[in-house]
Amino acid sequence: MGHQDIKFYQTGTFTVGNRLLPPEQRSVQADMERTNSLNSGHRACQGCGEALGARYAIDAAMRATGNRLVAVNATGCLEVFSTPYPETSWQIPWIHSLFGNAAAVATGVAAANKVKARKAGLALPETRVIAQGGDGGTTDIGFGCLSGMFERNDDVLYICYDNQAYMNTGVQRSSATPPAARTATTMPVGDEPGNEWGQGKNVPLIAMAHGIPYVATASVSDLRDLEYKVTKAMNMRGARYIHIFVPCPLGWGSASQDTIKLARLAKETGLFPVFEAEYGEVTNVSKIRQKQPVEAYLRLQRRFAHLFGKKPRLDVVARFQEMADQNIRKFGLLGSDRAAVGFPGSEHK
Amino acid sequence: MLKQCEGSHAVAEAVALARPEVICAYPISPQTHIVEGLGEMVKAGEIQDCEYINVESEFAAMSVAIGSSATGARTYTATASQGLLFMVEAVYNASGLGLPIVMTVANRALGAPINIWNDHSDSMSQRDCGWIQLFAENNQEAADLHIQAFKIAEELSLPVMVCMDGFILTHAYERVDMPTQEQVDAFLPPYVPRQVLDPRDPVSIGAMVGPEAYTEVRYLAHAKQMQALELIPKVSREFKEIFGRDSGGLVRPYLLEDADTVVIALGSVLGTIKDTIDEMRADGISIGVLGINSFRPFPVSAIRRALSHAKRIVVLEKSFAVGIGGIVATDVRMAMDGLDQRIYTVVAGLGGRNITRASLHRVLRMAMHDQLEGLHFMDLEWNIVNRELDRERQTRRSGPIAENILRDLGQTKSNVG
Ligand SMILES: Cc1ncc(C[n+]2csc(CCOP(=O)(O)OP(=O)(O)O)c2C)c(N)n1
Ligand code: SF4
Ligand SMILES: [Mg+2]
């Protein structure tokens, strides 16, 4: 089949028409055979980044495993909007147990599949497992189970859909909520409105510190990259972690049609570094293509409206800019630089 | 084959004979020897085709068990006390999802104050969790019940908790007749799940259910426990056919037929009670015992049938519901509803306090003369209790209770000594 060499550079995106690509590089979603694992008809809000991310991730994992996939879901928006009784959007074997145990339940699924494979005389199980949860289910309440699964190097891909708060319960702060953000438990009142400036909890880096085979961050602004990372992860064995940035129009107070734009701005400002790491070492970063000021990102979201109100908090905006610039330096997000700073675990292979 | 071995060892061997496919382990006294034994057997290849997973908490242990059971693997874990409490959310989830996991609870007291010794507070705290709860009287029965538990669990698609007294049984060396693999294979068929995470036939397990169906789903959990009332004795009979001994069942009567006074209890204390009752019978006293083997489901009809002729019932419990009293006694009252009987609750053996024949003689004789209060704490040291109550009346900042009492005890001892 005739095709052209790809010229990626268009205005601010990596978008490329599938017809320009050789078939093996075409996106899973463009494939007529895609499984629609998370089928239409679910109850997510319009413009939900989590629904979009999950659809691409699971379909890609299905293709990578020859449709032999089980998903374990933590409690949260994805679980609730996909399975209101008596309906289910899931076209694959799917289990929801609790809020904080998805990683451990997936370990159990993997263990059972391993035993079954051995009994059938197979060297490796054919059926693979993904665990998935929101940022709350991952970085807070499910963190112990997640770390245990990493440490044992269980054959599980864990996907965190990070929308930066407890959305399903009405937008409360999680350990992934950015500073200054308005949530229902960090209201924009008082001298320091919104969420406190803490130290933050960077779960991708913590995952790397476990030295597991694969860690990646991804974003719904680059779905082809997301599919690539999920596919790559499913072609590996052992504990793997992908942290996907998924804007939430309802929780962030953003327009439904701005979901992709916000995700792209998070990456282009440097606020959300997109990278891959293997065995604790960064192996690849997605460069910023057109650096954007953090203000462009913050202004589109009502959760940051108090920074630009009657008493603008330019000092807070400047701190965000510092955060972004630090990420840019640390991960080498600009130009052709390599990462400037060593990552935990990168000193030994 | 007859063996002189530790209770934990007997249980580990029994579990091994059931051919488990996934075992999750997290240590807590007095359960440790069981999972240690199983770990060694898996590593040595004595249990084949089994994954043994050292998890990071009891919450993870039960969660891993949920995942593997839902994937169609025969799954086992064990815990006790704080460990059981730490996994509670997943304990309810396993039964709610109808997953036939088998778990040993090596019964131990609950903190605070932290205490590693035996009582039944841990299992009793989970009496409403939807699991079947079987109590073992001795190590032979502990081993046998595990083999029966897999059969009951898998037939009903419900999890089963086998409760055995921590230390008193887990760490005691007794003679146990270990079944052979052939016997167990003949008794326990391979696990055929009702629901399984299988890409060839995808299902959604654990979906959200609202008011339109929640009551029905919950009622079905109850209905299954009612089915267990028939299945547990049936499995016990089948067990006897193959293994030639009585083990399990709902209740176990002893010298009951003509007894005016009947003692009800669970677990290893039944041995001491039976010895006491033999002595009382020798004195011409009309007394008997009913052991409860299945606490959940609670065998209401079997108990009523066995006790309808009794004049009085003494329920001896190794736990109690703070603020009301007996837990088992409350259920017994329900079973005996409408009958004219005195029902006494005797709370005994908390946190490992010895239940002696002397104390039993004293308390049971008081009951026979109807001189016992409705709720009696056996061998309670009133002077210690009153001293602390006094202190609290006198001083606002009276300090931590347990530490005060230990200090008082030290003083009493040194005063005496
Ligand atoms: C043990 C427990 N605590 C709290 C909850 C309530 N709860 C359910 S979903 C949820 C928020 C989920 O947040 P997150 O994991 O970030 O997923 P999102 O809904 O944002 O996608 C909370 C707090 C629960 N179900 N279980
Ligand atoms: S609240 Fe947010 S995460 Fe939840 S369904 Fe709506 S957009 Fe998606
Ligand atoms: Mg969230």
Image: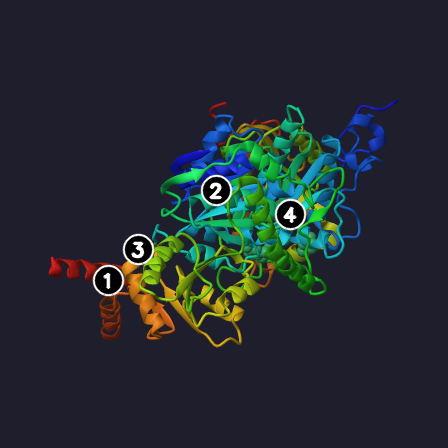
In the rendered image, residue B229, in percent from the top left (x then y), is placed at 59, 57
The Cα–Cα distance between marks 1 and 2, rounded to whole angstroms, is 41 Å
Q: Which amino acid does the dot numbered 1 rest on? A: Asn
Q: Judge left or right: residue A102 versus residue B192.
A: left
Quadrant hosting residue B313: bottom left
Q: Which amino acid does the dot numbered 4 rest on? A: Glu
Identify the residue position indicated by label 2 in the image.
B143
Mark 2 lies within 8 Å of ligand 1 (Cβ measured): no
Q: Quadrant of ligand 2?
A: bottom right
Identify the residue position indicated by label 3 in the image.
B354
Marks 3 and 4 close (CB-CB < 8 Å): no
Q: Could you tell me which secondary element the residue under label 2 belongs to? A: helix
Which comes before the other along the chain, label 3 or label 1? Answer: 3
In the rendered image, residue A45, in percent from the top left (x then y), is placed at 73, 55
Which comes before the other along the chain, label 4 or label 1? Answer: 4
Q: Which amino acid does the dot numbered 3 rest on? A: Asn
Point out the frontmost of discs 3 and 1. Answer: 3
Identify the residue position indicated by label 1 in the image.
B404
Seen at 78% across and 33% down, the residue is: A27
Identify the residue position indicated by label 4 in the image.
B155
Chain letter of disc 2 in the image: B
